[in-house]
Amino acid sequence: MDSQKSHVIVLAYPAQGHINPLLQFAKRLASKGLKATLATTYYTVSSIDAPTVGVEPISDGFDEGGFKQASSLDVYLESFKTVGSRTLTELVFKFKASGSPVNCIVYDSMLPWALDVARNLGIYAAVFMTTSASICSMFWQIDLGLLSLPLKPQTATVSLPGLPPLGRCDLPSPMSEPTSQTAYLEAIMEKFHSLNEDDWVFCNSFEDLEIELVKAMRGKWPLVMVGPMVPSAYLDQQIDGDRAYGASLWKPTSSQCLTWLATKPPRSVIYGSFGSMENISAEQVEEIAWGLKASNRPFLWVLKESEKKLPTGFLNSVGETGMVVSWCNQLEVLAHQAIGCFVTHCGWNSTLEGLGLGVPMVCVTERTDQPMNAKFVEDVWKVGVRTKKDEVGIVTREELEKCIRGAMDGESGEEIKRNANKWRELARSAVSVGGTSDMNINEFVVKLLEGKK
Ligand code: UDP
């Protein structure tokens, strides 16, 4: 089978934190000679601009606005399963009719029904995990019955192979509060239940990053590390490499940010962002605002609807020292020499971007996998400081200021910078030619080019 006949559809869940790594994976496959098409929902395709990859819509049943139109996550995921299975199948038939047959579907783990679509069509199926391998290992252990939910009230620490001891506050939120996130937990568990049925299980991580887990699980589970899925120009230093994910669900204010950053000294600016689904309480926004101001450093903060959320008079009080925008090209900002610290919610993509670009982090987490990613940032990779919440669940301005100083100043700041440089290099070598992730992708490409399915 020649490369143009080996055609992979990469199916992404329609959220920024899912489209980015899956689109990046599609681009990697295309750069290695496969034909790759990204499939996502009707209302997200127009946000994608990736010339080396085809982009095609499928339907989740809510073609005007997606998830926001659905009455609950349950309803949304059920509709996506029914309508998505049908329209994904139709897409594969369309390609067959046009002389470009598809021989593999790589699908987002949030869309586990794509396995059945691939099976029914007799083509390869590969699932792509958008979280860390450590998070995957926890759900895997739950599926095997080695870890039972809900945790017993007396369980203070969870010990699992290859992971540091985890306190309750470190666990992914569907585990620490399973009753409040049933649909989300069920979608995840459905995937882990069928893990051995996939031809490949890919994870957006790299072996060195989770080496203890890799050692503990060798030969026991099918996970293959292919990350970090960060555009190549930022990681393997290709001057003419890929400089953006190629997908933005919001309009970035990039030139404004870069002009402002250019006026600041190297490594002086705090960049704050809480991800694409940021849902921070008014009280927390206020504490972050005053904490950033108190740090006495320039800051660039991504906050949607800031005019509604920021404390009155805040922007006037900071003047030129602070800039608040509704969305930016985060990679471009993190890669800027003026950035000295990343105040982050520790979404997995943001965590990998901070690590891959060698930026010290301050973690202000909310939910899902964020607390566990933060635990690794502080205790395992030692590239940042994790904020503690007060008794009502708020990170106070004093706490934020203290953690920013810890990540940027003095001996702790120096040690964090050294570690951040080390991890940046390790991330680069994983994706560079001959690196562990690069080799893992090559094996997949070779298999597809053999064209057995
Ligand atoms: N992002 C961006 N601009 C912003 C904020 C975020 O481009 O202003 C990108 C960021 O680079 C990352 C993604 O959005 O790739 C967010 O994914 P993450 O897993 O960090 O968090 P989520 O949005 O899923 O909570």
Image (tube, rainbow, N blue to C red):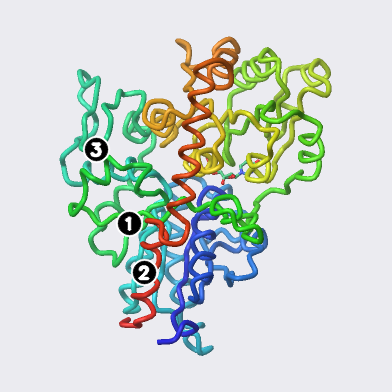
How many residues crowd around disc 2 within 10 Å: few (fewer than 14), some, or many (20 or more)? some
Q: Is disc 1 surrounded by few (<14), some (14 to 19) or many (20+) residues within 10 Å?
A: many
Q: Nearer the viewer, residue 225 or 167?
A: 225
The answer to whether 80 is drawn above or below residue 290 in the figure is below
Residue 344: x and y in percent read: 55, 31
Whether label 1 touches label 2, CB < 8 Å: yes
Q: Which mark is residue 444?
A: 2
Q: Is mark 3 within 8 Å of ligand 1?
A: no
SS label for mark 2: helix
The residue at the point 47 percent across, 30 percent down is 383
Quarter of the image for residue 149 reads top left
Front in this rendered view, residue 252 or 419: 419
Q: CA distance from mark 1 to mark 2?
A: 10 Å
- Picture coordinates of residue 245, whole percent (x, y): 60, 55
Q: Decide: is 390 above or below 247.
A: above
Q: Quadrant of the C terminus?
A: bottom left
Q: Which residue is mark 1?
A: 224
Q: Is residue 259 above or below residue 271?
A: below
Q: Secondary structure at mark 1?
A: strand
Q: Please give the residue where the numbered disc 3 appears in the rendered image.
A: 162
Judged from the image, the quadrant occupied by ligand 1 is top right
* Kind of residue sitting beneath label 3: Gly
Q: Three-letter amino acid code at disc 2?
A: Phe
Query: At which x and y percent is residue 196?
Result: 23, 60
Give the Cα separation between the discs numbered 3 and 2. Answer: 26 Å
Instruction: State how far apart marks 1 and 3 are (Cα).
Output: 16 Å
Q: Earlier in the sequence, mark 1 or mark 3?
A: 3
